[in-house]
Amino acid sequence: MTEAAQTAWLNAIPAAIFVVQHDKIAFANRAASDLVGCPPQELRESPFATLFQDTAEPGVARLLRRNERPLLVELTRAEIDFGGAPAQMITVMKRDPARLYRDAIAGSIDSFFLARLDRDADGNVIDVVVVDASERGIEQTRFPRDQVIGLSLTELYPEASYADLLQGFAMAVASGQSYSSELFVSNRVVIDGWYHVQLVPLQDDHVAVFLRDIDERKASEEVVNRLVNEVEQQARLLDEVLSATPDTFILFDRAGHYLYVNRKALENTGLTNEQVIGKTWRELGFPEEAGLVFDERREQVFRTGEAITYEEQFPALNGLRDFLATLTPIHDENGSIIFMLNTLYDITERKQAERELQKLAADLEQQARVFDEVLSTTPDNFLMIDREGRFVYSSPTALSNANLSAKQVVGKTWSELGFPEEMGAQSDQLVKQVFATGKATTIEVVFPTVQGLRAFESIFSPLHDKTGEVVDVVITNHDITERKQAEEALRENQRLLSSINDTVLAGIAVVDAEGNYVQINRTYADIYGYSASEMIGKHFTMILPPESREAGISAHFSVLNGEIQPSARRWQIVRKDGQTREVIAYNSLLPRENGERLRVVVVLDVSEQAEAQRALEASDRRLNSILTSMEDAVWSVQAESRELLYCNPALETLTGYSAAEFRANHELLTDVVHPDDLDYFRESRLGALEEQSVDIEYRIIRRDGAVRWVHNRYWIVRSGQDTRVDGIMNDITDRRQAAEQTMQLAIERERVGILSNFVRDASHEFRTPLSVINTRLYLMEKISDPQRQGEYIDGIKEQADRILRLVESLITMTRLDSITRMPFERLDLNRVLVMMNVSAQTSASRAGLTFVLDLSPEALHIQGAVNELMTAFSAIFDNAFSYTPRGGRIEVRSYRLNHQEVAVDVRDSGLGIRAEELPHIFERFYRVDHARSIHGFGLGLPIARKIIELHQGRIEVESVPDQGSVFRLIFPADSQGRQAGSGINTMHMND
Ligand code: ADP
């Protein structure tokens, strides 16, 4: 047979045939290409193995068809000769359906039964008979296989409760549609329980029955239904409650079906109850990603039986929301988990708040860091104190000032930190005040820091919360120690400034490019004598005299063109009143953003300064001419080196030495001093260091040898580091002589005055006895009675005696006044008194008095003059006799008063002297009134005192009126070594 005849024959066979040579398809007939689904030529030469896959069953392969599901086929092989070469003819057959069925039911995991319907004559289905059953199906029954096969439905359900099922079979077969039902099965065949029954109609009234045990599920469902019923009841109540809550409640079954959702949950989804109940998330079209995670969680709850809580975010109708979700397992009576409750708390706000809080906290922390950093760079320090006076915050600077840490400070009070009581009290008081008033207050305090005492400006300011209530007080301490010092310096400056005349204040004017005044200050206007309004808009040359206007304009443009740097220049200006003044003008350019150029001029009126300067120069000149022409010598030397810095020609005239000689010899000013006055001169120089100016008079020896008296006034001048001595020296020789003469003259005059007083007083004393004598003589001439004449003569004698005594006293007085020196000898006072004793006793007895002399046993040596001493004693004795009435007693006692002195007391028991008289009794011609009637002249005591004083001694008086007086004469004792005649005394003229 030819190949063509062979292929035509093979194509005619209805079975699919492949001819394979060397494992490749050499030919496929029409049926074969139909089965694979592609033209025969495409199959040619393709490897057979790519089309047919081996299966575990021998002779059965899986045919990989084009565009169709793979097909299990049975292959039959035969060896043939094809085209002259050996080949394999493979016949492909679809697998036997019966076998397929057997395999299917054998391997089915479902309970499967094949049933056949029995019909009556009318064709009504009357029974269903089991024809076959799967292994799982047999297991489901209570019988072995041979008893199951052949079982009829009527046998199974004698109570005819199978009617529905029978009906179902009939319906399924009649309609050709599968029918399913869930029913509780309780028969002799299968184990009692709930089953899902599915009937699939086959040919010839055969029906496939799939039975699925849903007992477990049904049990769950029952609980669910019960619970749902219960829940539904409660739910209505609960719903009311739950719907009022913002939380979401969802009840799921194990498979993830929604069983219950509350109103909030519906609101979240926007769905109705009907749309949701019984569905899974997938059916509701929720996003896969979230759904899978939820499934996992749900599984976990069912597996572990433990509730889980988590936070999640998912979109709700009102946007992306945050939820706190809880999955809680719900158990049935047996403890099996049947549902799961999903509770969702909307925590969006809380989360937002949390996030904001976190952000805020982060911000705050950041701020605090920045705050701290900023604060640590400022010298200011900050404290925050709460209502209880406790520290809430302390800035780093404050902490380092106090050398404390934040931990130590926060929560403490001032006193707890050991600050001085009164300081804490002041702060607490101010904090209280700020809390009470809500107003800041500032004080200045001095505060101990680690750098010592510092001055601070403390601002106590309130810190408010949102409601405006004061929650804390912030104390800002600004170290103002430097500022205080600066202020002090400033005040000092201001004191200086205020002492400077107001005219130094600058006038300021702004002039536009054309030269017109745009702006001027008051001082400016004042300087020129105009008012501001009179100047604004006018050209600045108005204040310049005509001759300098051109210069003014050119200066103006120089400034505008930036040709000259800001500089100062003097100008003569003319005021409104015509007065000429001198000003200094400082010009500068003021460029404006709009391109306009302005000139700013600052003006100082320096007329006074200029005048003062001129005056100073003039005065300098004058001074110079004065210095040159003056007679006083002016000199100036460097303090240390004594180098002559300046002298005028008068120094030359005064000393005879030239300025050059003074410059050459630094000691010349000292060298010219008279040797006798040199010490005095040097001493005065020492004084000059302490006092500022020294006045001395001394003698100098001129170059020509002449001695001259000079007055030198000099003072120390300190200027900066240099110290010099300036002086003025003048010749006072003439003045000195004149002064000496004047003094002599004064002394003379004094003497004359004293004498004339003396004479006046004395003549008064003479006048009385002389007039008595005169009267007596007159009466003598008139009277011839010899007895009376005798009386007159006695009277005349008495007055003559008186005159004699007066003259004696006056002579003594005058002598004592005139002597300056008195020859002294060493003598014993006792001996002097003994010498006077006889006459004293005589006088005493005449006066009817007792005179007692009580001498010291030891000799009382003094330096003295015997006659003078006797005169003095006589005067004292006479007074005692005179002023002591008859019968009285006079005691004279000599004794050693102390180591250096000896004394003589003259004590009488007489009239005594009143206290007011005592100071006067030693004055010349002084007499106490009562004594006038007696005989004295008032010269006794002055003479006595003079003599005692010439002996370097003194007189003391104690007296009690009507009881007596004690006159105590005290002399310096003469020790053995003292030379006789050495007592030289100076007379005091005005004594
Ligand atoms: P006369 O020459 O008058 O005594 P004196 O100078 O001696 O002058 O005394 C001055 C006055 O001092 C006397 O007038 C007398 O009043 C008073 N006087 C001096 N000695 C005594 C004394 N012993 N007792 C009382 N009065 C005395």
Image (spheres, grey):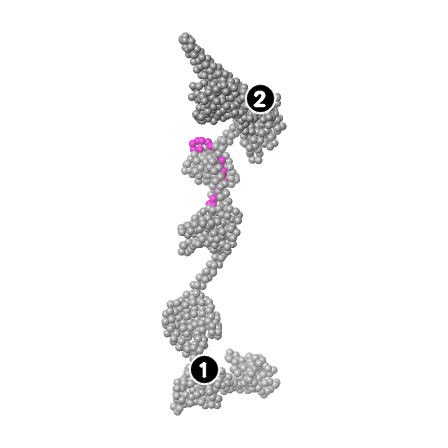
Gap in angstroms between the C-alphas marked 1 and 2:
174 Å
Q: Please state the extent of the stretch shown in magenta in the rendering.
A: 575-594
> Can residue 23 be seen here?
yes
Q: Residues within 10 Å of mark 1 (few under 14, many from 20)?
A: many
Percent coordinates x, y for residue 985 in the rendering: 55, 22
Determine if residue 700 is in view.
Answer: no
Where residue 324 appears, as percent x and y from the top left, is 45, 67
Please give the name of the residue rendered at 58% of the width and 21% of the height, measured from the top-left corner. Answer: 825
At label 2, which amino acid type do we have? Glu
Q: Nearer the viewer, residue 53 or 115?
A: 115
Which residue lies under the disc numbered 1?
A: 213
Q: Is residue 199 left or right of residue 94?
A: left
- Asked whether 787 falls inside the magenta stretch, the response is no
Q: Quadrant of residue 86?
A: bottom right
Q: Say which element carries label 2.
A: strand
Residue sitting at x 42%, y 82%: 182
Q: Disc 1, disc 2: CB below 8 Å?
A: no
Q: Which residue is mark 2?
A: 825
Name the kind of residue labelled 1 in the image: Asp
Query: Which quadrant would the N terminus be assigned to in this image?
Result: bottom right
Main SS of residues in magenta: strand
In the depicted structure, whether residue 845 falls above or below residue 552: above
Mark 1 vs mark 2: which is more N-terminal?
1
Q: Front-most of 371 and 214?
A: 371
In the picture shown, does residue 454 fall above or below 912? below
* Label placed on residue 336: none
> Which residue occupies 48% across, 40% down?
491
Instruction: Confirm or reject: label 1 Cβ below 8 Å from ligand 1.
Output: no
Q: Secondary structure at mark 1?
A: strand
